[in-house]
């Protein structure tokens, strides 16, 4: 009996010693890796942005070497140890566009407020601050510490051209503050920002539009577009109409535009918009109201978006929502965000005029910050392409591809006639949609419930005044 007991005890002891040895080996590997020279990957470039940066890769670190879009920003991540679901240390670079500001009276978000917000999110204390000046940017940083958790974070941010921002964050959970500092400084030193010819081209086209004035793009002081919306099987599911008018009034907001987007199926989806701008669209007010299909609570969802650009260059975006038929829900508090509109920003309601100017100037490729009707500002790559081998066979004079950088696989093909007016487009998203220019009488016949607004623009204007 004693011999058996002693044997079992000996086996358990050996297993325990082996476990301690493995743990010590892993700890030693961690310490050696963390205290050795930081090995970086080759710089990873962000397409169309003129930005690249190198991340830790090697000595136990692993980097995806690929920018990933998430929550209005592109992110590049590295982790230690490689392949771990719970890394001991991590590094992250975030390319933010455009940089949000705290209010309409502020040129940019204060660095200290930015740091304080990050401190609250981490639930730590700022124990050190610093600055790294590179050829690309001046990166301000803070060291945030949680001593009771052996947790250290270095978080830094730097301004980039065209209202962009780069955030760099390194964190670790072993209490090694030197690790985060060395890794952070190594990453920041590799930051490279070069001229972005596509952004410069976009800014040039928009500047030419402003110099020309929106009124110069309109036929007889007004321009109307009316399109039937079909799926790829040819089934007509809705229509879209927009009217742009130069009122000729002496008031600053002489350009007015109205829009109605309507689709039906199992549910009706309707969006109305009203746009008023000065001739250079340096000051405008854009109101959008949408009624979407029922949500999880069974009630139709009504949402409103207000987009206002002041002559100071501050862009205010206000969003609100309401569940129709549910009196108990009440109005949701409106959400308000502020940005500084740069030289590359343009509201998507002026898309046709933008493409016309691109064609006229002979520009083949550019990047602009598209202000969308849903309140998002999305960098969009725009290029002229040959009209062969596309999903919609057309004989139009021009074919232009628009690709929002925030969604992989999403794009729009826009066909323009010889007068540089949109004749049709293919929108590739979850459900492909085809927009074909149509006559008012044909659209009214297919959608009699909206015929009065299709045939009479004054009634559409009255509806918009009442609704939004």
Image (cartoon, rainbow, N blue to C red):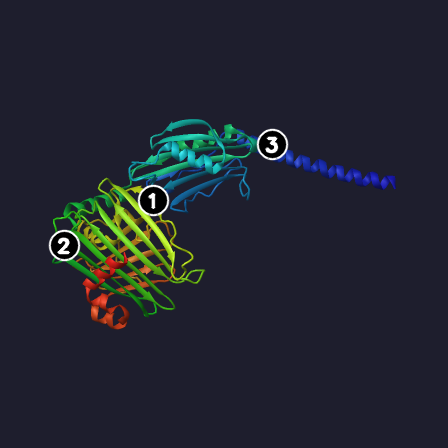
Q: Which quarter of the figure has residue 428?
A: bottom left
Query: Of the residues tagged 1 and 3, which is closer to the observer?
Result: 1
Identify the secondary structure beneath mark 1.
Answer: strand
- Residues at badges 2 and 1 in contact (C-beta under 8 Å)? no
Counting from the top left corner in percent of width and height, residue 121 is at: 46, 38
x 40%, y 47%: residue: 71
| Residue highlighted by disc 2 | 247
Is any atom of residue 74 visible in this view? yes
The residue closer to the viewer here, 287 or 324, is 324
In the image, residue 132 sits, relative to residue 101, either above or below, namely: above
- Sequence order check: which comes first, mark 2 or mark 1? 2
- Sequence order check: which comes first, mark 1 or mark 3? 3
Crowd class of label 3 (few under 14; some 14 to 19; many from 20; radius 10 Å) = few
Label 2 to label 1: alpha-carbon separation: 30 Å
Is any atom of residue 36 visible in this view? no
Q: Which quarter of the figure has residue 186?
A: top left
| Residue highlighted by disc 1 | 337
Counting from the top left corner in percent of width and height, residue 234 is at: 32, 70
The residue closer to the viewer here, 454 or 378, is 454
Identify the secondary structure beneath mark 2.
Answer: loop
Counting from the top left corner in percent of width and height, residue 199 is at: 27, 43
Crowd class of label 1 (few under 14; some 14 to 19; many from 20; radius 10 Å) = some
Identify the secondary structure beneath mark 3.
Answer: helix
- Sequence order check: which comes first, mark 2 or mark 3? 3
Image quarter of the N terminus: top right
- Residues at badges 2 and 3 in contact (C-beta under 8 Å)? no
Numbered label attached to residue 213? none
């Amino acid at each position: 009996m004693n011999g058996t007991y002693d044997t079992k005890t000996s086996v358990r002891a050996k297993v325990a010693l082996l476990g301690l040895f493995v743990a010590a080996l892993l700890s030693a590997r961690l310490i050696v890796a963390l205290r050795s020279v930081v090995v970086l990957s080759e710089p990873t470039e962000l397409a169309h942005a003129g930005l690249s940066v190198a991340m830790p890769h090697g000595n136990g670190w692993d980097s995806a070497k690929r920018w990933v879009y998430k929550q209005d920003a592109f992110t590049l991540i590295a982790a230690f140890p490689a392949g771990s679901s719970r890394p001991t240390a991590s590094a992250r670079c975030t390319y933010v566009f455009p940089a949000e500001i705290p209010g309409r009276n502020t040129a940019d978000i204060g660095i200290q407020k930015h740091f304080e917000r990050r401190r609250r999110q981490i639930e730590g204390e700022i124990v050190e601050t610093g600055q790294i000046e590179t050829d690309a940017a001046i990166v301000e940083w803070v060291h945030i510490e949680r001593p009771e958790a052996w947790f250290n974070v270095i978080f830094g941010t730097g301004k980039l051209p065209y209202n962009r921002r780069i955030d760099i964050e390194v964190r670790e959970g072993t209490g090694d503050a030197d690790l985060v500092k060395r890794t952070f400084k190594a990453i920041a030193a590799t930051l490279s920002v070069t001229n972005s010819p596509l952004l410069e081209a976009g800014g040039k086209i928009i500047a030419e539009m402003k110099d020309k004035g929106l009124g110069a793009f309109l036929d007889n002081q007004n321009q109307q577009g009316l399109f039937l919306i079909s799926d790829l099987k040819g089934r007509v599911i809705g229509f879209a109409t927009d009217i742009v008018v130069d009122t000729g009034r002496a008031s600053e907001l002489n350009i007015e535009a109205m829009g109605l987007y309507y689709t039906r199926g199992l549910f009706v989806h309707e969006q109305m918009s009203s746009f008023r701008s000065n001739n250079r669209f340096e000051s405008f007010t854009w109101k959008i109201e949408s009624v979407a299909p029922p949500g999880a609570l069974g009630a139709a969802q009504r949402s409103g978006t207000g987009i206002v650009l002041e002559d100071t260059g501050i862009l205010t975006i206000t969003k609100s929502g309401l569940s129709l038929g549910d009196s108990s829900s009440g109005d949701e508090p409106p959400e308000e965000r502020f940005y500084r509109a740069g030289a590359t920003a343009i509201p998507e309601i002026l898309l046709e005029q933008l493409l016309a100017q691109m064609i006229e100037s002979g520009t083949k490729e550019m990047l602009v910050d598209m202000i969308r009707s849903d309140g998002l500002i999305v960098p969009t790559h725009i290029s002229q392409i040959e009209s062969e081998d596309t999903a919609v066979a057309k004989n139009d004079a021009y074919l232009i591809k628009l690709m929002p950088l925030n969604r992989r696989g999403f794009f729009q093909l826009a066909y323009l006639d010889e007068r540089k007016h949109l004749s049709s487009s293919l929108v590739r998203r979850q459900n492909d949609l085809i927009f074909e220019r149509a006559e008012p009488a044909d659209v009214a016949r297919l959608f009699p419930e909206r015929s009065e607004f299709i045939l009479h623009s004054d009634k559409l204007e009255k509806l918009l005044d009442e609704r939004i």
